Image (spheres, rainbow, N blue to C red):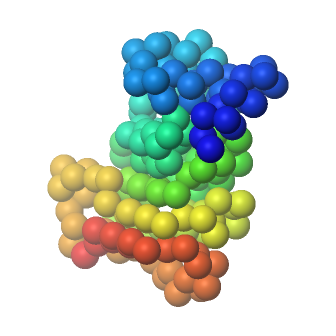
Amino acid sequence: TASVYADWLQGQGDPRGELAALLQRGCEAEASAHLAAHGEALLGDLEASLDSEVCGLVWQHGFLAGPSLRRTGIDSSTDLAELTATFLALPLTRFLTALRFGLASYESDNDWSETLRAVVESPRGPHIRDLRFDDYTGEDCEISWTPFGDFSPFWPHLPSLEHLHIRSG
């Protein structure tokens, strides 16, 4: 069970174990403090991106079940596909089953194809059950100016996918 795994991680000195134990006990403030204190160990270079490019964290049984990954704005130089690949390589994502994405581009050339490629090429790809390409507002980009790209080559690599939401024009 999740608590046994959290105990084992704690015994190994892995900060994910303490984070999971705190979340399982409903100690959200302490879990947030632990995440902040051990951000580099848990998120590596993405620590600085927490609550901006990596946000909306959803926890289940003390482990990360889903985040939202996005660029912070029109002037951001972040490549969403690279952010996705880097994030999905983290041990913190071991039990991830859901992903939500913001825009890959704030211009009328948005294309999530490479972002989806990063998902299916990750070890998490076969376990993803919920994909959402909708974390943006009309102020970010009008829906009619938001293409999504060609996802057709990726469907065979998402055997667990149950829910897909694409907000696009």
Tell me if residue 3 comes above or below residue 21 in the rendering.
Answer: below
Q: Residue at x 72, y 23 (%)?
A: 10
Quadrant the N terminus occupies: top right
The image shows residue 79 at horizontal and vertical percentages of 56, 51
Quarter of the figure with residue 145: bottom left
User: Is residue 90 in view from this perspective?
Assistant: yes
* Residue nearer the viewer, 111 or 166: 166
The residue closer to the viewer here, 55 or 49, is: 55
Specify the farthest residue to the right.
12
Apparent side of residue 99 relative to residue 45 in the rendered image (left or right):
left
**Residue situated in front as seen by the camera: 137 or 16:** 16
Is 131 situated above or below 35?
below
Q: Position of residue 164 (x, y in %)?
A: 38, 72
- Horizontal and vertical percent for residue 15? 68, 23
Q: Quadrant of residue 44?
A: top right
Specify whether 128 is left or right of 146. Answer: right
- Identify which residue is drawn at 71% across, 60% down: 123
Q: How many numbered marks does the figure carry? A: 0
Q: Which residue sits at x=32%, y=53%? A: 135
**Along the viewing direction, whichever of 152 and 16 lies nearer the viewer:** 16
> Where residue 17 appears, x then y in whole percent?
66, 27
Q: Is residue 95 above or below residue 4?
A: below
Q: Is residue 7 left or right of residue 34?
A: right
Q: Quadrant of the C terminus?
A: bottom left
* Residue 69 in sight here: no
Residue at image location 47% in from the left, 49% down from the top: 66
